[in-house]
Image: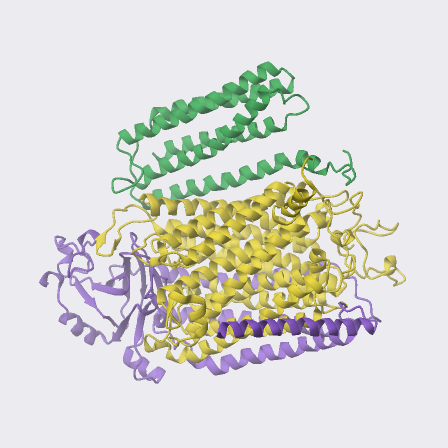
Chain colours: A yellow, B purple, C green
Amino acid sequence: MSATHHHHEEQDFLFKYIFSQDHKMISKQFLITGFLMGFIGMVMSTLFRLQLGFPGESFWAIDFFLGSWAENGVMAPDKYLALVTMHGTIMVFFLLTAGLSGTFSNLLIPLQIGARDMASGFLNMLSYWFFFVSTIIMLISLGVEGGAASAGWTIYPPLSALPQAIPGSGLGMTLWLISMAIFIASSLLGSLNYIVTILNLRTKGMTMTRLPLTIWAFLVTAILGVLSFPVLLSAALLLIFDRSFGTSFYLSDIYIGGQVLEHSGGSPILFEHLFWFLGHPEVYIVLLPALGITSEIVSTMSRKPIFGYRAMVTSILAIAFLSVIVWGHHMFVTGMNPFLGAVFTFTTLLIAIPSAVKVFNYITTLWKGNIIFSPAMLFSIGLVSTFISGGVTGLILGDSALDINIHDTYFVVGHFHIVMGLSAIFGMFAGVYHWFPKMFGRMMNNTIGFFHFWITIVCAYGVFFPMHFLGLAGVPRRYYTNSEFPLFDNMLDINELITWFAIVAAFAQLLFVFNFFYSALRGPRASQNPWRANSLEWTAPVEHIHGNWPGEIPEVHRWAYDYSKVDENGDYVNGEDFISQVVPLGPNEKDGGH
Amino acid sequence: MVALVAIVAVLLIVISAVQTLKIAELWAINKGKVIYEVTKKQNKTQALLMLVFLVAYFAFFAWQVWKWGDLMLPVSASEHGVVTDKLLNITYAFIIPVFIITHIFLFWFAYKYAHNPNRKAVFFSHSNKLELVWTIIPSIALTVLILFGLSSWNEIMTPVDSEKEHVLIEVQAQQFSWNARYAGNDGKLGRAGVEFIEGINAMGIDINDKNAKDDKVVRGEIHLPVGVPVQFVFRSIDVIHSAYMPHFRAQMNCVPGVKTQFNFVPTITTKEMKKITNNKDFNYILLCNKICGAAHYNMQMDIIVESKEDYEKWLAEQKQFAEN
Amino acid sequence: MTSITLENNDYKKEIKQKTAKPLLWIGLMSIVMFFAGLTSAVIVSKGTAVWETIQIPSAFAISTVFILLSSLTFYIGERSLKNNQLTKGKLFILATLLLGLLFTVTQYIAWTDLYKNGVVWAGSESSATGSYFYALTALHLLHLLGGLISLLVVNIKSIKEKYNTENLLGVQLSSTYWHFLTALWVYLYLFLIFIA
């Protein structure tokens, strides 16, 4: 090394914080980027809630944030659609796919399975930087001529293919597609790494049946990603061809702007098939990591083993399997073959079974536990609640005969925001509160955490529960205002109430932001195992080191859920209410909760 | 200036919050606490809040039903809608109890089993019997829902028998309006395509097709006879739209390049529905329910259901396509 | 298996030895899904869109022969390196690269033939069938480009005699990918015959 000392330090900084290949640093990068995007998505939703709650009224905030998109503080109708589209895209992909899975898969996989790092640190770094570039492109698209993509986050052609149809389908949509293509590359690189790391780099004794449920969830999530994201890429590519080169994969018989287009022979329904082949697994790509995180936290904080470990794993697998054969339930009213519709109804409703098993198992884990209400635990219980509340309405939407009348209404918006949006973000919050000491070596403040949770859950239900009623009254989604014709005049009160809840919920997140940065910089130092948990990450030192453990990687001797295990005298085995996975089994002890 | 004041204010709030927090933590450490551990008192409060939340959540649910129940869609104005509404109610009868019972268990257990240092949690890691029970019970309930759902789905999706008396209407969607055409006396719709769109012929009907001559193009509103099956054919000439008729529990996408269809039997006239809803301004409506562009929110058309006689009278007044 | 410790700090190398192949395999799985998406799109389109019949250029058949041969030479080359027959290995790996380039050339010829027969990629004269022909073959070629780059690297390294019985990972990865591309092409070729 001929570099000067100074130069050496600079290089160190660059590789430690920016182009790091260490999974712990990459996980923090994903977290911060994801949350930043999430914050932007949340501000967007608050702004269009203002429009819906108080249609046509002028607001300082709208003027401040939207500028030329909103003359005199009232947003333009097509910009409303741009906001809705970007809100959906950012939340689903950038916050809840990359932010959630990227953060916790990266942090926990090597630490919980006992590996030095990911299979390929380099690909892992690329994965983050692709993600970063895609966020930048997506943000740039907000400022281009014609505005950002405005065809809904599902970007159905022809609306997304023709700038004549809506201004956002010009440069804005091009950037959207480029950003998404890069995002898919990022997601694939991440998923490859997660799968291979879990399958190949487990420490001695870490059999598949001893893996914490988090890892199972991450594994299945990554497999779903590898199976479904390439299909979205193929759909997006064909769309790019149609838009930019004049092919006719999706377009046919179109008369717009006073002329007949020369595209012929394609079908927009094809795009819907390809899109939802990703789109539905995507729901579980978002949800499963949150469920995995919750499984871990509910067990640790109840001081009880997770109930039905094997059933939990089986239900994750069953959900994942079913999720790739249900995409048609998004298309019941596209004129699809009624027989196909019947098949999709059947497969869709089947998902209720493994989901119900998971819920019952969570509840049974609480039963006769010894529950410590850390903020992470509160969010986990909140997740179980949202998973139930949003899940049961899935039985209505998944039933093709019932879906006819509530398809694309606010009922759907309420349903998926609760079951997927809230559940996933609650899982993410739970994960951050729980593994903050592992990430930053410091603890978050509990009191602020309590306030954050209670305000959030109350307001979240206040926002999304009433939407079911709007939907049952026939209010379509993606309407700029409901007051253009008299049918929905009575709904204004509901919309206003929802908006108020949304505003409070948005401000409550500032509590979290404050807590996060305060704790990361000034919070009390963490001990090595603050939650007295069993899994392997808590045997690693608080300080982050390359390779995670000094000396040998610990060997694993038992599953991760030996909480409150007692011997025949009723005393705790090992003297405490938890037994780390590295403690060898006693002479008469059986593994795996038997 | 306002922005500057705002920034300074926010900064001051953050700084004071940091200081307060720091002091509170130092205070706690002074008293010998491990400050990040959830204290006994906090744990108790949180447990209690679980119960409070349970009650408040149910109360909120009940309040919404009470307050907004009347705003929901009135009784179905189509034959199949009555069946699907019944199916909806059966589904409610299943999911609302599940929702309530699981929530009671969830929050009650959370409250009841809050941490107590003198108690040991029960090491209860699995029970095949229990797990079997809650796999089988939902399976049975689902079988019922699926069977009922599928039988009505198949019925709804079967097109009207063309031999039977029925009304055939083609609805064409475009940004941001609806056009409709009745099949005329021959009961057949003439050929149409985007290449024929010109001037007044907004639906692109082929003037040379003999089936097209007696077709009747209407704008602004469509009329339906009560008690007669109506077969809709949907088209779109630009982007995907969706023809949503909530009062008839009917919806079908309009896809460029593809013809889709839906049928129902209207059972309640507009006049009767005005009485049922107690709203003299009531009108059935056809809405666009698939994002289709800037004015998506205002793309609708009135539907008028009337007696067969009135309907025929109205239809007779409409011009045939060839007359234009 | 040696234990991985921080002291020897070799864990990165060992991790690479252990995981490079599975990484590639799962990567291949995602490529399979990508083409599965595209080919199922073709099947869906065939059911709905106007379908035109297309004369498959004979150049596609020739390129099929080239790529099959290239897989064979790569296999022989890899085995030679494994048996430390470095010269033979070098030659066969070079032959693979050349055959790969020939494949690329014949693909180009096939496209010009298609174009001459009136099958255009886009515009008012195009049909979905023709567009799929170009799209599928071009996207395969795009993946092949990656294969050619890896072959180039393998060639340079083999000429420098970096590979031997002990050190074969790079060749193995490259050849796995190459065989995969061959299989993918055969599948696409048969598929094209089927849809035409």
In front: B194, or A155? Answer: A155
Question: Which quarter of the figure is the N terminus of chain A placed in?
Answer: top right
Left or right of A160 in this view: B57: right
Q: Is residue A72 left or right of residue B98?
A: left
Q: Residue at x 50, y 32 (%)?
A: C146
Quarter of the image for residue C92 reads top right
Position of the C terminus of chain A by quadrant: bottom right
| Frontmost residue, A537 versus A514 | A514
Q: Where does residue A454 sit, x and y in percent of width and height?
A: 63, 73
Locate residue B81, reporting x and y percent. Answer: 38, 70
Give A185 or A325, whichever is nearer the viewer.
A185
Q: Quadrant of residue A506?
A: bottom right
Q: Give the vertical position of C35 relative to C105 (above or below).
A: below
C20, above or below B49, in the image: above
* Residue occupying the point 55% across, 58% down: A95
Q: Residue at x 29, y 61 (%)?
A: B160
Outermost residue, left side:
B323
Q: Nearer the viewer, residue B117 or A20?
A: A20
